[in-house]
């Protein structure tokens, strides 16, 4: 999983060094590394010391048209839609992906309805995504599947405008209203 590969970049180098890349993610000795999950991989306030959780809230959208193209490197010239108009990582609540598991959304089969467990969803009133430029944006509950798909592609050439407020930059994703207790 990409979540294993980036461990050294999120101050988890020791955990990365212990991972055995010759084994499956859920085989010993790797399964013994699963708990506790690095807090970076779950929504703010979902991580509690002493409460064991191995389910991540961050998944990639994998597909030929996305940032996460299987087996194909990506460079700046390939991102024709612009880094501020391209989703890198969306939130999800409901897919139940183990943080070490190499499973993510598949562009062709994911649910493009906001707040579906099989699509971009959150405990917050509006789910957020990290864009390729590093900005964090909330998505309107009214955003259409067509616009959402366009935001997930790197070179679709779609003309996108945020005049309806479908995706807003937010300074701190932890300060959003929660839809559930």
Image (cartoon, rainbow, N blue to C red):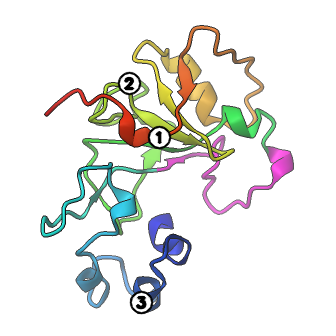
Q: Position of residue 141 (x, y in %)?
A: 39, 17
Figure check: 119 above or below 70: above
Left or right: where 49 falls relative to 169: left
Q: Which mark is residue 114?
A: 2
Q: Quadrant of residue 152?
A: top right
Report the mark closest to the observer, 2 or 1. 1
Q: Quadrant of residue 167?
A: top right
Q: Which residues are magenta?
A: 60-78
Q: Tell me the residue at 38%/86% (across/down).
A: 23
Crowd rating for badge 3 (residues with CA inside 10 Å; few <14, some 14–19, many 20+): few
**Residue at label 1?**
172
Q: Tell me the residue at 40%/51% (across/down).
A: 58
Figure check: 6 above or below 132: below
Q: Tell me the residue at 56%/14% (across/down).
A: 165
Q: Position of residue 54 (x, y in %)?
A: 24, 64
Figure check: 172 above or below 70: above
Left or right: where 16 falls relative to 30: right
**Residue at label 3?**
20
């Amino acid at each position: 999983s990409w979540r294993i590969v980036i461990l050294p970049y999120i101050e988890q180098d020791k955990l990365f060094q212990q991972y055995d890349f010759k084994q499956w993610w859920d085989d010993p000795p790797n399964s013994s590394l699963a708990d506790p999950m690095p807090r970076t991989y779950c929504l703010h306030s979902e991580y509690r010391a002493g409460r064991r959780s191995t389910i991540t809230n961050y998944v990639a959208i994998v597909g030929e048209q996305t940032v996460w193209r299987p087996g194909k490197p990506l460079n700046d010239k390939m991102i024709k839609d612009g880094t501020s108009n391209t989703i890198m990582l969306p939130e999800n609540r409901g897919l139940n992906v183990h943080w070490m598991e190499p499973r993510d959304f598949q562009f062709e089969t994911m649910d493009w309805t906001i707040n579906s467990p099989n699509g971009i969803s959150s405990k917050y009133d509006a789910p957020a995504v990290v864009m390729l430029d590093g900005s964090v944006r909330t998505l309107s509950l009214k955003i259409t599947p067509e616009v959402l798909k366009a935001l997930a592609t790197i070179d679709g050439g779609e003309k996108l405008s945020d005049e309806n407020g479908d995706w807003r930059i937010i300074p701190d994703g932890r300060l959003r209203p929660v839809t559930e207790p």
